[in-house]
Image: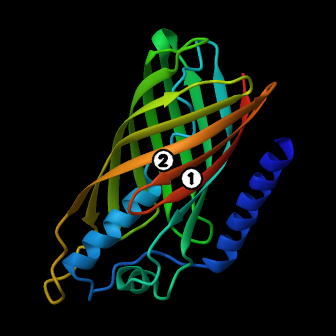
Amino acid sequence: MKLSMAALLIAIFISASYSSRAYANYDLLLPSTMTQSQFDDLSQQLGLAISYTPLAPAAPLGLLGLDIGVEVTAANIDETKDFWKNSTGDTPPSYLVIPKVHMQKGLPLGIDVGVVYGKAPGTDIGLVGGEIKWAFFKGGIASPAVAIRGDYTQLFGVDDISMKVYGADISISKGFGFITPYAGVGEVWSSSEDKRNLSASLTANLKNADSTDTKSFVGLKMSFFIVSFVAEADFSRVPSYSGRLNLSF
């Protein structure tokens, strides 16, 4: 199990390194020829790609609990679509890879809060976000934990687009020794604004793009003393795969 965990982590960081080279200086820019339909599709995929990734079981961390670590998310975008090619000036890689720093802290009453910061290598795509989770069933020896979560993510670094992404989900988990599998389902709401402020001689600014998508996820947390590793797969129109290495207290 430890060998498989290490192999997965190495594969994730190799992928991030490859993405950094493949994405050399790919800034996200809206061309004057972009249509409203293309902007809607780009916003939907970008919103799902940067949406909050839980990477944690439903069970609460507890009053003194703290997870702090590094993670990588690889989101499988439709890189051959015109809305990606036109906004990057070329065909981007099939996976938008975003390394992140992530912290979650336990509070009383089964509540956890978390913050995350991430930046896609070689691009202007960055994100910052936060969450609050309440485990209304904390779980026990024979019963699972069940939690609800609300989260928020904001895009930064992209001059042409302002984007906010909200999420809500319900999840369930059950620990078995040092292994805790979990699963959940929720909704993702994204809202994008064209920030180019085009002159009257060019195409008028595009209308705001709003979308709502269902996202489900499965994951596994493995704990070894004060070190833990979490792997998660998220399923939506833009599936993503994540790994996280924590110091857990």
- Viewer-side residue, 195 vs 65: 65
Decide: is 247 above or below 40.
Answer: above
- Image coordinates for residue 176, horizontal then vertical, percent: 68, 24
Mark 2 to mark 1 CA distance (whole Å):
6 Å
Read off the residue under disc 1: 118
Specify which label sits upstream in the sequence, 2 or 1. 1
Q: Give amino acid for label 1.
A: Gly
Q: Give amino acid for label 2.
A: Val
- Viewer-side residue, 35 vs 81: 81
Decide: is 207 above or below 165.
Answer: below
Q: Would residue 186 be found to the left or right of residue 34 on screen?
A: right
The answer to whether residue 185 of the structure is visible from this angle is: yes
Decide: is 40 above or below 223.
Answer: below
Read off the residue under disc 2: 128
Q: Would residue 165 be found to the left or right of residue 129 on screen?
A: left
What residue appears at the point 57 percent right and 30 percent down from the top-left corner?
Answer: 104
In the structure shown, which secondary structural element does the residue marked by tag 1 occupy? strand
- Image coordinates for residue 120, horizontal then vertical, percent: 57, 63
- Viewer-side residue, 112 vs 232: 232
Q: Would residue 115 be found to the left or right of residue 229 on screen?
A: left
In the structure shown, which secondary structural element does the residue marked by tag 2 occupy? strand
- Image coordinates for residue 78, horizontal then vertical, percent: 44, 75
The answer to whether residue 52 of the structure is visible from this angle is: no
What residue appears at the point 56 percent right and 70 percent down from the top-left corner?
Answer: 95
- Image coordinates for residue 94, horizontal then vertical, percent: 54, 75
Q: Residues within 10 Å of mark 2 (few under 14, many from 20)?
A: many
What residue appears at the point 50 percent right and 38 percent down from the top-left corner?
Answer: 183
Position of the N terminus by quadrant: top right
Q: Residues within 10 Å of mark 1 (few under 14, many from 20)?
A: many
